[in-house]
């Protein structure tokens, strides 16, 4: 069951999300679209962090996103993308009009049954659905500790990611790839990144301050981060590819 308040928390940010959140490796886009296609829709596109990897892979790139704050940034960054306000449950494009639908870091916010129906409706016959998530590398203790601060209910498992491997109504599972990559970022950006996650956005001032203090404490405690202005963060991107039945 999707928590509506958490799902809508992204209505309050745009520029900060774009500034502080990680992007995605190009290989993740290649797994979903190995050869150029006519059209691709990035659903729950946010500020376009994954959309920008699609522009060289399709003649037409569309983006659908419910948050105007996020869409505003996407439109400024990627003027050639056809960006629309909408949701996974109500996609404002005609039946069978795209070859590929991608969903980066957002499928867990969708109401699964109606969203799968809508995605199936807008995809061409045998069209491809690609779902992807960045997640923390289980070998990186300090990043895992920060994840537990922001997502105590998830703990050490990757609930959102693993739920993607389930059967999706109307789709046939094709493949799962894991892409490992590294990100070098300043400590400031890393700390501010935590201020863009949904649990932080819906928290009150006191809880927000506690969460950021706890992140700073983790960074001061680890030998890999203490006293460093630039952090070397291992990242894992899980990509799940499906085909419309
Ligand atoms: C964590 S952000 C990911 C944004 C972008 N795909 C990225 O990877 O940077 C989740 C996005 O899903 C959007 N979202 C939430 N509920 C949605 C829904 N029902 N349909 C479409 N998008 C939704 C949010 O507005 C937000 O932009």
Image (cartoon, rainbow, N blue to C red):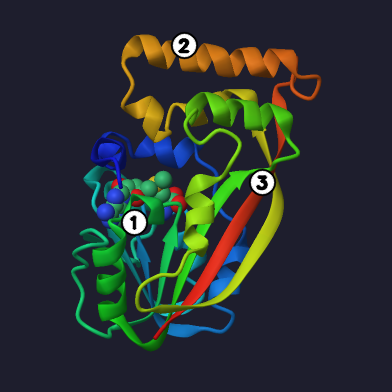
Q: What's the mark number on residue 44?
A: 1
Q: Could you tell which of marks 1 and 2 lies nearer the N-terminus?
A: 1
Disc assigned to residue 56:
none
* Mark 2 Cα-neighbour bin, 10 Å: few <14, some 14–19, many ≥20: few
Q: CA distance from mark 2 to mark 3?
A: 25 Å
Horizontally, is 216 left or right of 8 in the view?
right
158, above or below 93, in the image: above
Label 1 with label 2: CB-CB less than 8 Å: no
Question: Residue 107: x, y in percent?
Answer: 39, 56
Image quarter of the C terminus: bottom left
Q: How many marks?
A: 3
Instruction: Tell me how far mark 1 sits from mark 3, CA to CA.
Output: 21 Å
Disc with the residue nearer the chain's start (2 vs 3)? 2
Question: Looking at the image, which is closer to me, 165 or 149?
Answer: 165
Query: Relative to 158, does residue 32 appear above or below in the rendering?
Result: below
Label 3: how many Cα within 10 Å (few below 14, some 14–19, many 20+): many
What secondary structure is found at the residue carrying circle 1? loop
Mark 1 C-beta to ligand 1 under 8 Å: yes
Labels 2 and 3 touching (C-beta < 8 A): no
Q: Is 190 or 137 nearer to us in this picture?
A: 137
**Quick one: SS at disc 2?**
helix
List x then y, in percent, for residue 117: 26, 73
Q: What residue is rendered at 50% in x and 31% in y?
A: 193
**Which residue does the numbered mark 2 point to in the structure image?**
210
Q: Residue at x 42, y 61 (%)?
A: 103
CA–CA distance in space, label 1 to label 2: 29 Å
Quarter of the image where one finds residue 123? bottom left
User: Is residue 186 visible in this depiction of the protein?
Assistant: no
Q: Nearer the viewer, residue 122 or 12?
A: 122
Mark positioned earlier in the residue sequence (1 or 3): 1
Q: In the rendering, at what x and y percent does residue 232 appear?
A: 74, 35
**Residue beneath disc 3:** 235
């Amino acid at each position: 069951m999707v928590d509506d308040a958490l799902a809508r928390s992204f209505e309050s940010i745009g520029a900060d999300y774009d500034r502080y959140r990680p992007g995605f490796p190009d290989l993740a886009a290649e797994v979903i679209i190995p050869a150029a296609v006519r059209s691709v829709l990035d659903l729950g596109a946010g500020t376009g962090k994954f959309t920008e990897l699609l522009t060289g892979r399709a003649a037409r790139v569309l983006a659908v996103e419910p948050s105007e704050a996020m869409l505003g940034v996407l439109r400024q960054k990627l003027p050639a993308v056809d960006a629309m306000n909408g949701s996974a449950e109500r996609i404002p494009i005609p039946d069978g009009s795209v070859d590929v639908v991608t969903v980066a870091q957002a499928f867990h916010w969708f109401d699964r049954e109606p969203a799968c129906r809508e995605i199936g409706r807008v995809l061409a016959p045998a069209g491809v659905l690609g779902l992807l998530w960045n997640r923390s590398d289980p070998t990186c203790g300090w990043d895992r500790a920060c994840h537990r601060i922001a997502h105590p209910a998830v703990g050490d498992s990757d609930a959102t990611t693993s739920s993607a491997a389930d059967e999706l109504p109307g789709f046939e599972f094709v493949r799962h790839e894991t892409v490992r990559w590294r990100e070098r970022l300043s400590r400031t950006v890393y700390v501010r990144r935590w201020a863009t996650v949904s649990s932080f956005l819906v928290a009150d001032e006191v809880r927000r301050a506690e969460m950021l203090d706890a992140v700073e404490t983790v960074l001061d405690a680890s030998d890999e981060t203490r006293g460093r202005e630039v952090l070397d963060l291992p990242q894992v991107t899980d990509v799940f590819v499906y085909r419309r039945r």
